[in-house]
Amino acid sequence: MPGVLEGIRVIDLTVWFQGPVASQQLADFGAEVIKVERPQGGDQGRGVISVKTMPMGDWNQYFLVINRNKKSLAVNLKQAEGQAILHRLVEESDVFLSNLGPATLESWNLGYEKLAELNPGIVYATNTGYGMRGGVDKPSFDMTVQAQSGLMPRLGEPGQPPVYLGVGSGDAYGGMMSALGILLALRRRRQTGRGQQLDASLYGAQLFLAAPMLQGYLATGSDHYAKQRSRRDAPNPLWNLYPARDGWLALCLENSAAAWQRLCASLEAPDLEEDARFASSDLRRENGPALVDALDAALQPRALAEWMEAWQALDIPASPVRTFEELAVDPQAWENDYLLTTWCEAVEREVTVRGLPVGLSETPGRVQNLGPELGQHTELLLTELLGYSWDEVAELKSAGAIP
């Protein structure tokens, strides 16, 4: 079954995570993504064998998963011959995507004005650290940008160091934002015939990630939205984290009389329901720390599974706080293709990978293959797509423009 983006060709001049994950989303749904890499070493992600000193296993999961479903073109863009290859490819493509610095792209004759001259329909997408305007141009990583977003001081318990959300959240979110921007620009091109320039920055993605608390602060200026809050100081004690006998759970109930009655019924704690301190929503809010302590004591004796069974019957929204180990065997994740298995050439076996966050009934995404070898498709793309003769390919090799 063809993917919904079949017929769209993307030049992917990106490295590390945000840019590659943007093009991965497009490739998963059928776009032809051509990953352009330097002949010596390629994308720096190819060298990742550990994350924060923790080994990644016996195959490079960092690179191979976020560069799945792509082709690899190795070309030296510091040479005029290499730049000419890219210009020729731009003429045959729909999207140019890069997370390299604007100055670097300009030095390689790959700025927007040049590429739009070659192909007025090109959608030119960049992933900067802090946005195209404002003059901030400094090295950016998920952690450094999150530090600037105001999100870190909001997480964790009062008096503790700022908390890094981690897991490459800004990069992943920024990649999704970039993919969305590309699709919007392609839609506009269908109407006008012309492409445009767009940028999805790490900073913008992190600010959107912080949206609920950020908007609350912008509306009120209250530190309630901006600084760490204790779990015992939850605005709604019924919407909080609590310990069970064998782990933590997340309880998400509105602070209403009906919800309070359902919860008390499940706790089998008549004294709690009759406690005058908790007799109304306002009193439960005012006496929040005492109520959190009381719920801690009431929930601690029973196991997570017992609470989940009891609360499901009473329509009480809750979930165990699970580990990746538990997630990896969750049938719900597998049934919805959020987790998949696919063949890995590097280790010659089926491996588990994160799957598809969006499900389409008629044109679903697919993981056909993991990331390509460096330059794997160079000669094929030059001869079959761009029309180079084999003699010209040999000349490019001699000149050092391609490996």
Image: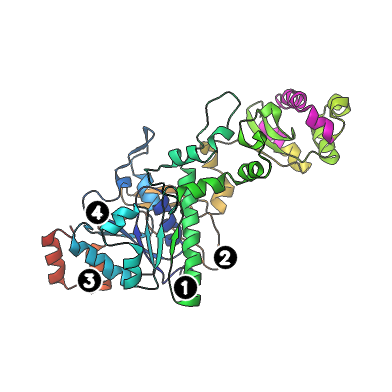
The kind of residue tagged 3 is: Thr
Front disc: 4 or 1: 1
Instruction: Examine the structure image and report whether residue 169 is included in the region drawn in magenta.
Output: no
Query: Which of the two labelled residues, at mark 3 and mark 4, occupies the earlier sequence position?
Result: 4
In the rendered structure, find residue 361 and report the number of the disc placed on it. Answer: 2
Q: Which residue is mark 3?
A: 383
Indicate the secondary structure of the residue bearing disc 1.
Answer: helix
Front disc: 3 or 2: 3
Q: CA distance from mark 4 to mark 1?
A: 30 Å
The kind of residue tagged 4 is: Arg
Q: Residue at x 30, y 62 (%)?
A: 110
Front disc: 3 or 4: 4
The kind of residue tagged 2 is: Ser
Q: Position of residue 138 (x, y in %)?
A: 37, 44
Is residue 248 placed above or below 258 in the rendered structure?
above
Residue range in magenta is 281-308
Near mark 2 (Cα within 10 A), the count class, few <14, some 14-19 or many ≥20, is few
In the rendered structure, find residue 189 and report the number of the disc placed on it. Answer: 1
Q: CA distance from mark 1 to mark 3?
A: 28 Å
The quarter of the displayed image where residue 230 is located = top right
Q: Which residue is mark 4?
A: 38
Q: CA distance from mark 2 to mark 1?
A: 26 Å
Near mark 1 (Cα within 10 A), the count class, few <14, some 14-19 or many ≥20, is some
Whether residue 267 is visible, yes or no, is: no
- In the picture, the quarter occupied by the C terminus is bottom left
The kind of residue tagged 1 is: Arg
Q: CA distance from mark 3 to mark 4?
A: 19 Å
